[in-house]
Amino acid sequence: MTDPFDDTYFMRRALQEAEAAFEKGEIPVGAVIVVENRIIARTHNLTELLNDVTAHAEMQAITSAANFLGGKYLNKCTLYVTLEPCQMCAGALYWSQISKIVYGASDVQRGFKTLGTTLHPKTEVVSGILAEEASALMKRFFIEKRNLN
C-alpha cells in the first residue's frame, strides 16, 4: 500500500498556498513545512502586503516552523515549496539545518542552483514535484500582470 502522505500530497498543499498568494496579487509561491507527516507551517509570499523583500514563502515558513517547534533548527523537517528557493532563502535554509527540500518548478534565473548557493551538507533536495502545475501558475500570474499594465 502506498503512503498517502508522499511528496505529491504535500506539494499540493504548497500549491494551495501559491494560489492564495496569486489571489492576493503576490508572486504565487507557496510553502509548507512538514514533520512526521504533519504540516507545522503553511505560508506564501507576502512581499507586497508586508512591503518586505525578505517576506518570501520560505522565509515565512522557516519562522513559523521554528516558532511551532520552539527552536531554530529544522533538522527533522521537510520544506515543500512550489518554486526553487533563491539564494537568500537557501542561505536561511542552510542555517535552519532543514533535512529535506522538495520544490516544484526550477528558477533558472534566480534559483539557488543557478547561483551556486550551498545548502547544509545534510540537506536532501528533490526537484520537479508538480513542476508543470507550479510553472503554469507562475506563467498565468505574469501574463495577467502584464495585461493589467
Image (spheres, grey):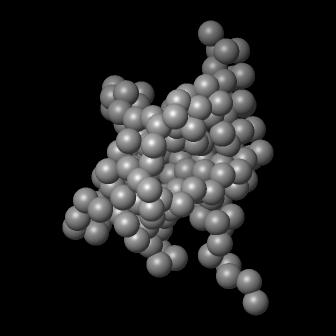
- Quadrant assignment for the C terminus: top right
From what the image shows, is residue 18 above or below residue 72? above
- Residue 25 falls left or right of residue 41: right
**The N terminus: image quadrant:** bottom right
**Could you tell me which residue is drawn at 77 percent across and 45 percent down?**
132
- Rendering coords of residue 121 (x, y %): 44, 56
Residue extending furthest toward the front = 121
Rendering coords of residue 78 (x, y %): 49, 64
- Identify the image quadrant of residue 57: top left
Using residue 40 as the reference point, say whether residue 11 is left or right of it.
Answer: right
- Above or below residue 104? Residue 110 is above
State whether residue 27 appears in this view.
Answer: no
> What is the quadrant of residue 106 in the picture?
top right
Residue 124, placed above or below residue 139: below
Q: Residue at x 39, y 50 (%)?
A: 93
Residue 127 appears in view? yes
